[in-house]
Amino acid sequence: MTKGEDKRALRVAVIGAGMSGILAAIKLRQAGITDLAVYEKADRLGGTWRDNTYPGLSCDVPSHLYAYSFEPNPDWSHRFSPGAEIQAYFERVAAKYDVESLISYNAEVTRAAFEVGRWRLEIKDGRTDVVDIVLTATGVLHHPVSPQIDGLTSFSGACFHSARWDHDVPLAGRRVGIIGTGSTGVQIVPAIVDEVASVSLFQRTAQWILPLPNPEHGEEEKAAFRASPELLRATYLDLAERFQNTFARAVVGDHAQMQRIADACRANLDDNVADPALRRKLTPDYQVACKRLIMSDQFYPAIQKPNAELVTDAIVRIEPAGVRTADGQLHELDVLVLATGFDGHRFMRPMQIVGRDGLTLDEAWADANEAYRSVAVPGFPNFFTMVGPNSPIGNFSLIMISEMQLAYIMQLVELIRTGRYREVAPTAAATARFNAAIKEAMKGTVWVTGCRSWYLDRNGNPAMWPWTFERFEAEMAKPDLGDFDLVA
Ligand code: NAP
């Protein structure tokens, strides 16, 4: 027990120094856990906001909502602020709370094993650490997917994934190809179209797009936010409520809400794409929001510029000079960008995780990634995941989700800290029940209405939360200890 407090002194490791890891470090320390290490595989914090620096990057969740609830920022430049500003925000918050001093950089945890009641961590550089509790904060969208296209490596120009943007490659006056029409590809096209000689966007599947304008926050508005913490808080709550009552309901079965969103997407296409042939090519053949819904009022104007081309013939192969499509045409290019997304199902892998009795996470998740309420896995005591499987990750502020998950995890950590229990893990039965309920509820969601998307795992099950946000809030409020294996 620590002096003055009737609590065990725990050593805790947080893996990952992105949005969730920074949050965990701040909150754990505020709760009095000071023996804390944050391991980060890269040389800088920020997670996805560090990795993604492509032109046009912004967060399509309103900035005043996409921030820690305890660190509102009156100075956001736009309703949907650019990525660099978001990265700077995380760096500023980490500095303010002295999270930096806890982070080991270039320190990829390769193995975590539960041995005699504690977790032994192995770091790539040969170091080891032994801790009482592990929190993985490794994010969702951090394993870039390179497309399986013949000849990809034969391309003679510059070629890179959107999450590994090569800023040494000039774009001005050059012929640029972009493969992929997800949120990323749709943000890149308007950002570069006026600079490049030509942009060819290779579309395999059309996307529904909701036209959200992105106004600047003027100086007066920022001054008002600076002067009034109450106004900042009210704005945060108002944005959260608006999202929860519209989009969050629509995707899990509120048909009237979904119809409104679908009508807005349809009108966006009809009103803003003049040429009927192009409009046809841009019209999806699946339900709005089956794939992650894209927000942009800039894409349609950009793709209609004279130097922009939407290529819908399938890519046959990549050749040294460019992209060959099924109609036989060679699209000659100087630069090829792979906006082909991420594997959102690998979570903390390739880290090897070994729980009780030698059970590995790869074994536990051999059939599917199944966690208990996204935050814990049976057989892995005192091991918690932030933004784990089936977190509500679609089009909402993941920061709010992460804060709720952490508050829940902290209650479990507290059981260990007070000495009430030495080991805490969910039961296999409760986890199976939770996952069976998820599968059943998923049938009523938009994500299973017939489209290909990164939400779907290899079994075709969406890695999403199939219920309302209110249900998430309620389930995350307090752990039901009956669902846990508790070793005193
Ligand atoms: P994505 O949504 O997974 O889109 C990948 C794109 O690449 C799709 O258009 C896909 O086509 C295409 N593609 C993949 N392999 C291909 C191949 N072999 N040949 C041709 N096309 C291929 O990836 P993303 O755009 O990077 O976005 C991923 C997620 O990141 C988003 O859904 C979102 O959650 C997040 N994100 C958020 C923001 C934001 O503003 N908040 C911005 C960017 C990204 P198909 O559709 O046919 O599969």
Image (cartoon, helix red, strand yellow):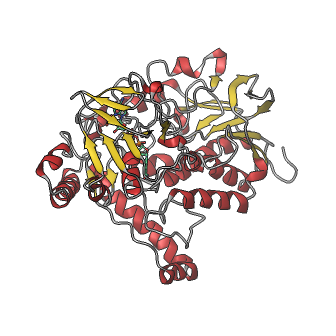
Camera sees residue 322: yes
Above/below status of 53 relative to 376: below
Image-quarter location of ligand 1? top left
Residue 7 position in % (x across, y down): 78, 46
Q: Residue at x 50, y 22 (%)?
A: 365
Of the pair 315 and 403, the residue shown nearer to us: 315
Q: Quadrant of the C terminus?
A: top right
Please give left or right for residue 100 compared with residue 365 in the image: right
Residue 429 position in % (x across, y down): 47, 25
Question: Which residue is most to the left?
Answer: 276
Please give left or right for residue 327 compared with residue 472 in the image: left
**Number of numbered discs present?**
0
Residue 74 position in % (x across, y down): 55, 73
Please give left or right for residue 12 compared with residue 312 in the image: right
Q: Residue at x 72, y 56 (%)?
A: 30
Above/below status of 139 relative to 76: above
